Amino acid sequence: MIKYKLKCKSSYCLNEKEFDGWFQNIEAFEKQKNQGLINCPICGSDKVLKSLATPNVKTSKIKNTEDIRDKINTTAPTEDNLLINKNSKNISTILRTIKKEIEKNSTFVGDKFVSQVKSMRDGKIKEKPIHGHGTNKEIQELRNEGIDVVNVPWISDDH
């Protein structure tokens, strides 16, 4: 796995800090980026760029097999070095929980999301909780019109 520093370049997040993204390889990153699957965790924008990074190569200073045995015994998995995996699982669990709550408490309207939101605002249809899809431009237009819209990363269900 390769860890990249990512930064959102949307006008909403321009001064926010970088965040990490883990990818199998550069091709996986590029494929997901081209498919619009990499979004900012703060605003949901797909204007995410990969920062320049240098490889982090650790060289071994172990000279003989006795040193290797000692090194192996002292670097067993601990609570601290497993924290990254625990946090990843926690984030996935939280996102799946949010997704289930949204699905349970709102109606999926698909690509009609933006038009439905505007119709509710204009009083043409009854207000109700909905979720669906909109382009980044459409979502930004809703925000500019004063409509509170939240992008939630939609991850696959845990099977």
Image (cartoon, rainbow, N blue to C red):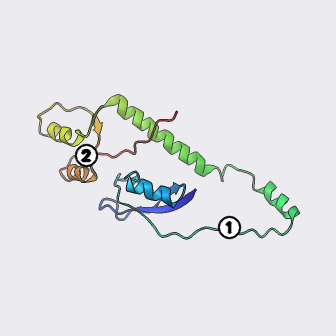
User: Horizontal and vertical percent for residue 116?
Assistant: 19, 38
The residue labelled by disc 1 is 58
Q: Name the residue rendered at 66%, 53% in the picture.
A: 81
Compare residues 138 and 146 and report the one nearer the observer: 138
- Name the amino acid, label 1: Lys
Quadrant of the snapshot with the N terminus: bottom right
Image quarter for residue 6?
Answer: bottom left
Q: Name the residue rendered at 79%, 56% in the picture.
A: 72
Q: Name the residue rendered at 36%, 65% in the picture.
A: 15
- Name the amino acid, label 2: Asp
User: Horizontal and vertical percent for residue 47?
Assistant: 35, 59
Q: Is residue 7 left or right of residue 138?
A: right
Marks 1 and 2 close (CB-CB < 8 Å): no
Reading the chain from its start, which is encountered first: label 1 or label 2? 1
Q: Residues within 10 Å of mark 1 (few under 14, many from 20)?
A: few
The residue labelled by disc 2 is 148
Q: Is residue 137 left or right of residue 86?
A: left
Q: Give above or below for 143 relative to 105.
A: below
Q: Give above or below for 97 relative to 66.
A: above
User: Horizontal and vertical percent for residue 23?
Assistant: 52, 55
